[in-house]
Amino acid sequence: MKEQKYILKNPDSFELKDIFECGQCFRWNKQPDGSFTGVFGYNVLNIKKQGKDIIFEGLCEKNIKETVENYFDLNRNYEEIKETLAKIDNNMKISIEYGKGIRILNQDLWETIISFIISANNNIPRIKGIIERLAKNYGDEIKYKGTTYYTFPTPEQLKNVSVKQYRELGVGFRDVRLYETTKKILEKQVDLVSLRQNPNTLEVREELLKLSGVGPKVADCILLFSDLKRFDVFPIDVWVRRVMNDLYIKEPDENKVSKKQIEKIARQKFGDLQGLAQQYLFYWRREA
């Protein structure tokens, strides 16, 4: 790995806060100077905005330009997507304006599976802490500018980790889930390569649901936020239920709103872009 630098000149739809704080990723941390540093694959990058340009700097396993283009989904026209969604209604228009710099990252499928199992009934600082301890104990070291970073451990690196060892990392009730899911992936009961190759989102979702700790919401997050890149899903948590009820369903008791109701409206209104619509709405209502 070598130190590399890449400058992205005046990009559309690229705001650091929107990308890293919209709930899709857990290994990017804000620095005192406003930049963000993160680890993905065998890469450690620091990203900052200078004027209208984005500067990527750090250690990259492969060519930094190609790595960045793939990970940040730079070859997709988000301006076109936003234009399409903004025409749907005023709620979408306002939410897009608020989160106009969101891009959905191409995160490694395996890392996304484990990260979102850990995320269940959890808060962001705690999720980040658990993932960091998992990486520190079982991943590989990368030294950069006097700091040691750790890669996310592969299934093979977690092969001999016991339920007790997971519990010692502070994962709580998720210890058995991480253990069982790792075992299923290693035994190819759920095959990651096949999931990536299958264009049928519903079939891939059914496979993901076989994994311990993966319910419908976690499965949808994996589909949307990993390199599976399926925008035709609509992850529903308490915030999404609230925003969909406030804006579209208007049931006096939001707890009576069913997932089926929400999914039906999302499908009718947003179609194949419902995953992105969810991100704009979620981020807008949670942050604003």
Image (tube, helix red, strand yellow):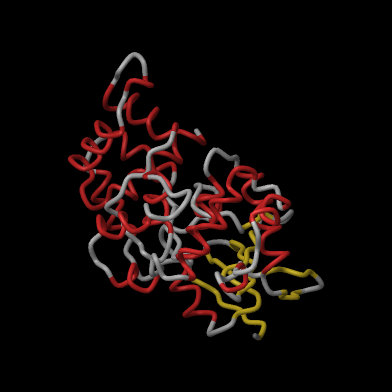
Residue 54 against residue 224 in the figure, above or below: below
Residue 195 against residue 15 in the figure, above or below: below
Looking at the image, which residue sits at the far right?
146
Kindly identify the residue that appears in the image at 35 percent across and 24 percent down: 246
In the shown orientation, is residue 157 left or right of residue 101?
right
Foreground residue among 27 and 138: 138
Looking at the image, which residue sits at the far left?
268
Kindly identify the residue that appears in the image at 33 percent across and 59 percent down: 207
Kindly identify the residue that appears in the image at 72 percent across and 68 percent down: 149
Q: Across the whole image, how many numbered discs are drawn on residues?
A: 0
Q: Position of residue 1 (x, y in %)?
A: 64, 85
**Quarter holding residue 3:** bottom right
In the shown orientation, is residue 25 left or right of residue 252?
right
Foreground residue among 95 and 241: 241
**Quarter holding residue 189:** bottom left
Looking at the image, which residue sits at the far top?
252
Residue 175 against residue 236 in the figure, above or below: below
Q: Position of residue 48 (x, y in %)?
A: 61, 63
Kindly identify the residue that appears in the image at 20 percent across and 40 percent down: 269
**Quarter holding residue 92:** top left
Q: Position of residue 148 (x, y in %)?
A: 77, 70
Q: Position of residue 141 (x, y in %)?
A: 72, 74
In the shown orientation, is residue 150 left or right of residue 61?
right
